[in-house]
Image: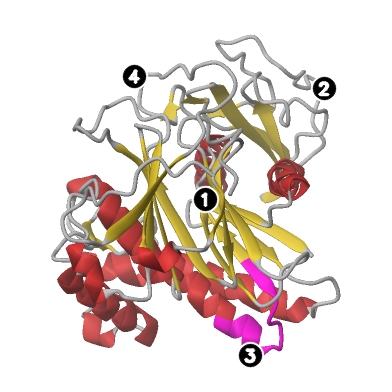
């Protein structure tokens, strides 16, 4: 154990211990001046046709005719530090039948697996913590915030379009 | 059993032992959905939006809303104004007690679980956690704190607790620099204690003023503070002493 400092750096004697924690092992983090989770497109309704997104797609979006009552809505592209996140939902007669992460940071190994459904993605993130003899992690991840941001936006769009 | 659900603008995860009664889990999420509907500032019909718009007198609001507003007022006073109910979204009229509601809803969910004889659980709500009873392995809950520089990939430390709340407020990836000083900036503030609503509010308040003073924390003797600095230093208050299991590779005790 290296107890580097034991000083009270804050007013009063509230803080009594200090300790150096290890810098991350791999390369430096590139920081982005843009606000995190910035929405860089608005929600696009792509049903029944498909509207091209300004970035090359990471997954193939279907151009087959959709079954009756089915509507596909792409969420906004949400920019975060390591890339762009986008959620696309499928509705059948107004009910959400599928949530897909159609764009994700390419540096995110977890997200580049084949199945990109919402629950598996978020649960994989949860399960990963258990490999390190850790029960739970405090501190929100950036990807899940960006994911939720896109998901909320697209669900809101779906609600509005079903009200019409 | 792990159940994940997007709620209140973030991710909620409930972990209970396999074989826990499904109806109790459904009750928890029904409760959280009710909280979201009641306290959402995104929904004009929510009680909190109607109070903000002047359409609903707080005295006629649901008991839970009055309770939350009273607790927020207490926290504002006890924290010397560091914690405060935010104004409505986009600076418009209204009130937004979201800084307390999320954690409080988890505290209440835990009580609901215990009342259904589910004593071993963890609830994760957007980076804040509450756990109780016995963990899936070992005797104490091992709660990792994300590394402020690489929050998706690394942990700065691990706390070992018998249960309770752990709330972390951080500015991961923030482009704007907060404030420099001899000791560097505070990159992340973690508060532990018996209530997630209070721990979350305190973490937000301490982060907002960059732990300029912690004297006012004497009013919260059951809560401990862990600060991760941009200078690579970890600092903590007495309630956390002995709970820090891992200072990271190379720093094991």
Q: Nearer the viewer, mark 2 or mark 4?
A: 4
Q: Residues under labels 4 and 1: Cα distance?
A: 38 Å
Task: Give me the disc on residue A33.
Answer: 4
Mark 3 and mark 4, same subunit? no
Q: Circle 3 is placed at which residue position?
A: B115
Q: Circle 1 is placed at which residue position?
A: A163
Q: Is residue B173 left or right of residue B96?
A: right
Q: Is residue B113 above or below residue A52?
A: below
The answer to whether residue B51 shows anywhere in this view is: yes
Q: Is residue B202 left or right of residue B52?
A: right
Nearer-N-terminus badge (4/1): 4
Give coordinates of residue B79: x percent, y percent.
19, 67
Q: Nearer the viewer, mark 4 or mark 1?
A: 4
- Label 4 marks a residue whose chain is A
Q: Which residues are magenta?
A: B111-122
Which residue does the image show at 23% across and 72% down from the upper left? B218
Give coordinates of residue A91: x percent, y percent.
70, 43
- Asked which secondary structure carries label 1, the reply is helix
Which residue does the image show at 49% across and 67% down from the upper left? B165
Q: Nearer the viewer, mark 2 or mark 3?
A: 3
- Asked which secondary structure carries label 2, the reply is loop
């Amino acid at each position: 154990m290296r107890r580097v400092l034991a000083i009270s750096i804050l007013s009063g004697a509230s803080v009594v211990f200090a300790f150096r924690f290890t810098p991350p092992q791999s390369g430096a983090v590139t920081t982005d001046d843009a606000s995190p989770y910035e929405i860089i497109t608005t929600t696009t309704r792509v049903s029944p046709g498909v509207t091209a997104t300004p970035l090359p797609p990471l997954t193939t979006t279907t151009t087959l005719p959709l079954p009756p009552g089915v509507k596909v809505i792409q969420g906004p592209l949400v920019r975060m530090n390591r890339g762009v996140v986008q959620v696309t939902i499928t509705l059948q007669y107004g009910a959400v039948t599928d949530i897909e992460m159609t764009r994700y940071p390419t540096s995110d190994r977890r997200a580049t697996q084949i199945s990109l459904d919402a629950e598996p993605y978020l649960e994989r993130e949860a399960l990963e913590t258990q490999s390190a003899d850790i029960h739970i992690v405090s501190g929100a991840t950036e990807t899940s915030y960006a994911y939720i941001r896109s998901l909320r936006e697209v669900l809101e769009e779906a609600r509005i379009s079903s009200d019409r | 059993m792990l159940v994940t659900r997007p709620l209140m603008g973030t991710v909620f995860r409930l972990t209970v032992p396999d074989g826990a009664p499904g109806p109790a889990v459904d009750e928890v999420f029904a409760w959280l959905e009710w909280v979201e509907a009641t306290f959402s500032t995104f929904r004009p019909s929510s009680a909190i939006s109607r109070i903000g718009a002047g359409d609903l007198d707080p005295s006629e609001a649901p008991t839970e809303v009055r309770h939350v507003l009273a607790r927020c007022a207490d926290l504002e006073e006890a924290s010397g104004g560091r914690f405060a109910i935010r104004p409505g979204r986009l600076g418009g009229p209204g009130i937004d007690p979201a800084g307390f509601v999320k954690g409080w809803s988890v505290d209440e969910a835990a009580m609901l679980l215990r009342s259904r004889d589910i004593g071993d659980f963890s609830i994760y709500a957007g980076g804040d956690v509450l756990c109780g009873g016995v963990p899936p392995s070992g005797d104490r809950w091992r709660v990792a704190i994300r590394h402020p520089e690489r929050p998706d990939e690394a942990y700065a430390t691990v706390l070992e607790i018998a249960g309770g709340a752990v709330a972390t407020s951080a500015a991961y990836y923030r482009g704007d620099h907060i404030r420099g000083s001899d000791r560097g900036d505070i990159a992340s503030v973690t508060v532990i204690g018996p209530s997630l609503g209070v721990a979350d509010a305190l973490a937000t308040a301490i982060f907002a003023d960059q732990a300029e003073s912690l004297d006012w924390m004497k009013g919260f003797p059951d809560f401990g503070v862990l600060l991760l600095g941009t200078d690579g230093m970890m600092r903590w208050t007495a309630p956390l002493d002995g709970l820090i299991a891992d200072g990271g590779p190379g720093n094991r005790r």
